[in-house]
Every structure is written in C-alpha cells, then in structure tokens.
Image (tube, helix red, strand yellow):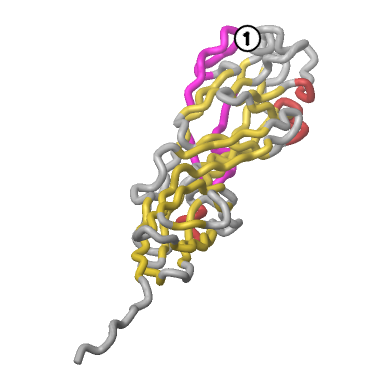
Amino acid sequence: MEINFTLKCIALSAFTLVGFKAQAQTYYADGTVAIKSLTVDTNLPDGASTDGTVGSWYKWNPNAGATTTAAYTAGDDPDGVGINDSNQADITWDATWPGATTVVPTAAQIAELTKDYKITAEEFNSCQTTATASSTTEIDVKLVRPDVLFIDADTSACSGSTATITLYGTPNAVVNYTITNGTAATAFVTLDSAGKADVTITPTAGGNVTFTISSVVNTFTQPVPLGTTVPFTNSTIISFATATITVGASPVISPIVF
C-alpha cells in the first residue's frame, strides 16, 4: 500500500483546520473551547474510510516538544493492533488562563494569554511498524484567549482637558468600548505586540466619565490551504470592565462680600 502523506491532512474541527504534512504551519484556536477533535487520513485516495487508511493504525502525541501539555483520547482503530489508535483524537487543552490583576501585569502574565501546542500523528501498518518522516505529520496550535488583565485609568480630569486610560491584555487584540460623558477618537483600540494600548478621552459636560469594555476580539488568518479569517471573541471580559474618571471644573470666584 502506498502511503502518500502529501495528500493527507489534519482537520481541526469547530473551524476545520487543515495542516498538510509538508507544511507544519501554525494555526490558531479559541482558548474558550476546552476540547478539539483532530483527524488524519480522511482525504481520498488513501483515506477512503472514516477509519483512516485501510490496514493502518495511529499514534497521537499532543505534547511534541511545545511548552504546553495536553491530554487526549482516541478511539480504537478496527484495523489496528492496540487501543487509542484511531485516526481521530479528542485533544483536551490544559490551559489555565491568568485572571484580572490589581497592578500592571508583567510580560510573563500577558504571554500566558496565548498557549503553544505542537501535536503530531504517526501512522503504522503491517509493512511499517516504526514511524518515518513520511508517516508522521504535525501542526502547531496557538490557543488564544482575548482578554484585558488590567485597566490603568486616570482617577480624575479637569473639564476641558483630557484623560488617559491604558489597557493591558492579549497582544494584537482589538478592545471595543463605550464612553459615557466623554469622547475618544474611535470606539476601539488595538493592543500592540506587547499587549498594551492607550485611550485618550476628552470629558464632555454632564458629569464623570465612565469607560466600559464591551468586547475583546482577536482575528487571525489561518495559513493556506484554509486562508480563512477567524475571529475569537471573549464574551466574559475581565471582572472589572469599567473605569470611572472624576471630572472637575475650574473654580469661579464670586465677588468679595463687604
């Protein structure tokens, strides 16, 4: 039986990631989803069966050299010689995400909003009982949680001046927000590669300024052959998604009473 892995793919369900053997590329996954199902050998001609290539069995390794580990479960291949050897595996990410902080988060805390996994699958049959380069495929998965860990806001501002709010969170995420009794250049800001962004607010008449985060979104373009744009949105947001800025007016003195 000819094994042609250039025609075989790994599909990551939920948004159908495809990673060809010849291109061990980096894909992105939603950090709010605990389990992903991955599959090899579903493409014709060799993967004519949903059980993979006829006569083959498989071995999965979701912890192939990356810094983050994961567990997995797999079915039993009807053609295989062991257990957990089907062409499909459910990967359970072990991601533990950082929570909101009360001080400016460190670079290490911000980095924890992205987890790195490298996952391999190996194929065997009666003609080949040890893995080779042509019977091994892999993908890198970046598990991402869009979030803001800390809001560093000016506590007060004078009428007619501006105030600054600094956000710290997932690098390259877009933070959408609303402002009451104030204006900003846009209704969103993009965190830089270090996970930081400033918002300049001009108070308007009517009282103190309230700044509220409405969503945090990361948008990624998966590599070819997918080439699809996938947005991941945090629906929970940080535990303190609102900041208040006290606005004061310049004093106006009355005449001296004699």
The quadrant in which residue 97 appears is top left
Indicate the position of residue 205 as horizontal and vertical percent values: 41, 61
From the viewer's perspective, tell me whether residue 181 is left or right of residue 143. Answer: left
Using the rendered image of the protein, determine whether residue 75 is visible from the camera's viewpoint: yes
Indicate the position of residue 111 as horizontal and vertical percent values: 51, 53
Asked if the stretch drawn in magenta spans residue 61, the answer is: yes
The quadrant in which residue 123 appears is top right
Disc 1 crowd, CA 10 A, few/some/many (<14, 14-19, 20+): some
What residue sits 38% from the left and 49% below the top?
A: 241
Q: Nearer the viewer, residue 256 or 130?
A: 256
Asked if the stretch drawn in magenta spans residue 179, the answer is: no
Indicate the position of residue 48 as horizontal and vertical percent values: 71, 8
From the viewer's perspective, tell me whether residue 7 is left or right of residue 229. Answer: right
In the rendered image, the quadrant that contains the C terminus is: bottom left
Under tag 1, what secondary structure?
Answer: loop
Tell me the amino acid under the disc marked 1: Thr
In the rendered image, the quadrant that contains the N terminus is: top right
Magenta segment range? 59-84
> What is the chief secondary structure element of the magenta stretch?
loop
**Residue behind mark 1:** 50
What residue sits 51% from the left and 37% below the top?
A: 233
What residue sits 60% from the left and 17% below the top?
A: 87
Indicate the position of residue 85 as horizontal and vertical percent values: 55, 18
Task: Classify 87 as above or below 213.
Answer: above
